[in-house]
Amino acid sequence: METAQSTLPKEEMLLAKFEEKTAAGEAIEPRDWMPEAYRKHLIRQMSQHAHSEVIGMQPEGNWVTRAPSLRARQILLAKIQDEGGHGLYLYSAAETLGITRDEMIQQLHSGKAKYSNIFNYPSLTWADIGAIGWLVDGAAIVNQVSLQRTSYAPYSRAMVRICKEESFHQRQGYEIMATMMKGTAEQREMAQDAMNRWWWPSLMMFGPHDTDSPHSADAFRWKIKRHTNDELRQKFIDKTVQQAELIGLTVPDKDLRWNEAKQGYDYGKIDWEEFNRVINGHGPCNKQRLSHHIRVHNEGAWVREAAEAYKQKQKNN
Ligand SMILES: [Fe+2]
Ligand SMILES: [Fe+2]
C-alpha cells in the first residue's frame, strides 16, 4: 500500500499534466486522468443539459395534436424526436464520467439536478411553438456552438451532432413566426404576445453574469467554457433583434438600442429575481413538468426491464 506521502506527488504530477493539456487546448477523453472537480462539474452540466432536452419536449408535445396543418405537425414531431435524441446522446456522454443514467434520473426527480428554467413556462398558443423554436432553440444554438470546442471530448462530439439539428429547429420556429406575421391582425397579435412572453426568459437561458457564478473560474481554466454568459447573450441578442425587425415583431425592451461603438445592442435589465424564483421551483409549470416526467418514467419501467432481460439473455447465449 502506498503511503500518503508517496501518493501526493503523483496526484500533483497528474494534475499538472492535466492543467498543461487543457491549457494547450487538448481534448480530454474518458480514460484520461482528470481532477474530481472537473468530473463533478461536467456531470452537473451535462446531466442538466440532458434533462433540459428531455423536459423541453413537454411544452412542445402539448401542441402536436393541435398543429394547424399536417405539414406543421410532421415538422413539430420530427423536432421533438430530435430533442429526445439529444437527451440520449448527452446521457450517454455523461455516463462516460462514471455516473449511471438511473442516478441522473433519480437526481432529476429528487430536485437535486436542475434543467433549463425556460421549460417551466407554459406554451399557450401556436405562436408559442414558433417562439420556442426561434428564441429558445436559437439561444441554445449560440451556447451549443461554443460548447463544440469544450475540453471534454464526448461532450464536444455530442455538441457537433446536436448543432446540426438545432439550426433546423431554429428555422422551423422562425418560419411559424414569419407566417403568422403575414396573417390576420389576430395572428400578428398572437405572434407578438408570444414574443413578449418568451424574450426575457430566453435571455435568462445564458445564466447569470459570470461574476455571480461560483463555478466560472474553474470552467474557464479547464476550457469547459470558452465564452462568458454575457458574451453569448450579446451574440444571441445581436442576431435575433434583426430577425425580429425583418418580420415586423417588436422586441419587448424599451432600453434596447444599437451601440455603434461596441457594434452590438445595449439592452435592459434582466429580472434575476424572477429567474431565481423559477429555479427554486416557483415558475408556472415546475410541478407539472416534473410530475409528468416521474409518471411517464414509472409507466415505462417495463420497457427498461424487458430491454435488460433481453440483454442478459443475449449474454447467456
Ligand atoms: Fe436540442
Ligand atoms: Fe432543439
Image (cartoon, rainbow, N blue to C red):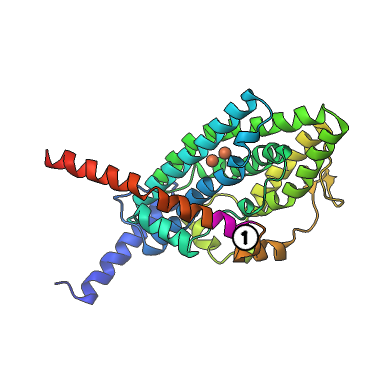
Q: Residue furthest top?
A: 71
Residue 192 in the image: state x and y as whole percent.
81, 41
Which quadrant, please, contains the C terminus?
Answer: top left
**Label 1 is placed on what type of residue?**
Asp
Image position of 312 (left or right of 185): left
Which residue is painted at 73% across and 52% down in the image? 200
Which residue is painted at 43% across and 45% down in the image? 90
Magenta span: helix, strand or loop, mainly?
helix
Along the line of sight, the residue nearer the viewer: 170 or 182: 182
Which residue is painted at 44% across and 40% down in the image? 158
Q: In the displayed structure, would residue 25 be above or below residue 182?
A: below
Q: Residue furthest left?
A: 317
Picture mark count: 1
Q: Residue furthest bottom?
A: 4
Which residue is painted at 67% across and 58% down in the image? 284
Residue 104 in the image: state x and y as whole percent.
41, 56
Q: Is residue 63 magenta?
A: no
SS label for mark 1: helix
Residue 1 in the image: state x and y as whole percent.
14, 72
Along the line of sight, the residue nearer the viewer: 48 or 8: 48
Residue 127 seen by the camera: yes
Image position of 110 (left or right of 304): right
Residue 38 in the image: state x and y as whole percent.
41, 59
Along the line of sight, the residue nearer the viewer: 183 or 277: 183
Q: What's the magenta region?
A: 285-290
Q: Where's ligand 1: which quadrant?
A: top right
* Mark 1 lies on residue: 210
Residue 264 seen by the camera: no
Q: In the displayed structure, would residue 125 be above or below residue 180?
A: below
